[in-house]
Amino acid sequence: MSGTLLLLTSFLASAVEAVEALTIVLAVGITRGWRTSLTGVVLALVALAVVVAALGPALVLYVPLDALRVLVGALLLIFGLQWLRKAIMRASGLKAHRDEESAFQSDVARLSGEPGKRKAIDRTGFVLSFKGVFLEGLEVAFIVITFGASSGQLGLSATGALIAVGLVALVGVAVHRPLSRVPENVIKFAVGLMLTAFGTFWGGEGLGIEWAAGDAAIPLLVLFYGVVAALMVAVIKARGANHKTLERKA
Amino acid sequence: MKWLSGFGRFWYDFIVGDSAALAVGGVAALFLGWLTLEMGGSALAQVLLPLVVVVTLAVSLLRR
């Protein structure tokens, strides 16, 4: 059960970040040339590979498992809560939904207006493409490494990420448009729940908690956090509606 | 020195992000879980840990 959830979380988190990176890469490619955009992608992937190669084995080989789980638990809790907070704010209308099409149009407009267009390697375009892929990829690398190290299933975790990135890249090459039909906000909600649940579980195990439900505690935690998050969305929406009613009456 | 502060700021932004309450609350949840365990309350720690996580999330939403 936890293996499936681990694979699914790694796949979904990677897919969401890959979709966001693809939007930037496409915008740079169309406005500044594909050579610039793809050079940024390749160098960012090399930089990510260096980070993963340096961090992955060091974590697995040199950090005791319990200490690693507390560290990983804390990091996953913080990441998961950040994703969940944004997802709750988007679902309740406090924050605008991320829209890949409008993000793409705004990147294209910004890059088209800047000088230095269509050089062999354009500096602005390169930096944007590199940063986009590196920063989106770094979060995925963190999730994959920490998941793999804590569960002892680095292969499974990496497989989920590789399938997601490969799939998004293939679709991106095929359609040459941002993947605006991917339900990004819903996926982020689900990933936020899963990261928070895994963070709680592994953090607790590292401290010495023996979960009464064993590995089944993970889906139970996902369920618990899911119900609480849905309640939070409902409460914020209701408060928003009350405020609007009061404003209209005043 | 400028490079070092930029490096530190990058990791702060990457890990803490736009809500310090989440980072503090996440660590506090684990610390309280550990404290409860040390006092012999394993069952209580299993309940307390997710509850503190939920309170952290609520606080960060209230402070937005």
Image (cartoon, grey):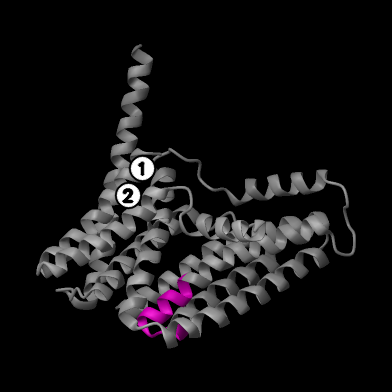
Q: Position of residue B54 (x, y in %)?
A: 26, 52
Q: Secondary structure at mark 2?
A: helix
Specify the quadrant of the image occupied by residue A163: bottom right
Residue under the point 52% across and 65% down: A139
Q: Is residue A183 visible?
A: no
**Foreground of the two, B13 or A77:** B13
Name the residue tied to disc 2: B57
Where's residue B57, x and y in %? Answer: 32, 49
- Residue flagged by tag 1: what amino acid is it? Leu
Which region is colored magenta?
A143-155
Tell me which secondary structure the magenta stretch mostly adopts.
helix
Q: Position of residue B3 (x, y in %)?
A: 66, 60
Q: Which one is in front, A51 or A21? A: A51
Q: Is residue A66 rendered to the left or right of residue A181? A: left
Above-or-below relation of A244 to B11:
above
Q: Residue furthest front?
A: B1
Give the image quarter of residue B10.
bottom right
Residue neighbourhood size for the residue with mark 1, other residues' Cα within 10 Å, grouped as few (<14), some (14–19), many (≥20):
some
Q: Is residue A202 above or below residue B49?
A: below
Q: Residue at x 26, y 49 (%)?
A: B55
Residue denoted by label 1 = B61
- Quadrant position of the N terminus of chain A in the picture: bottom left
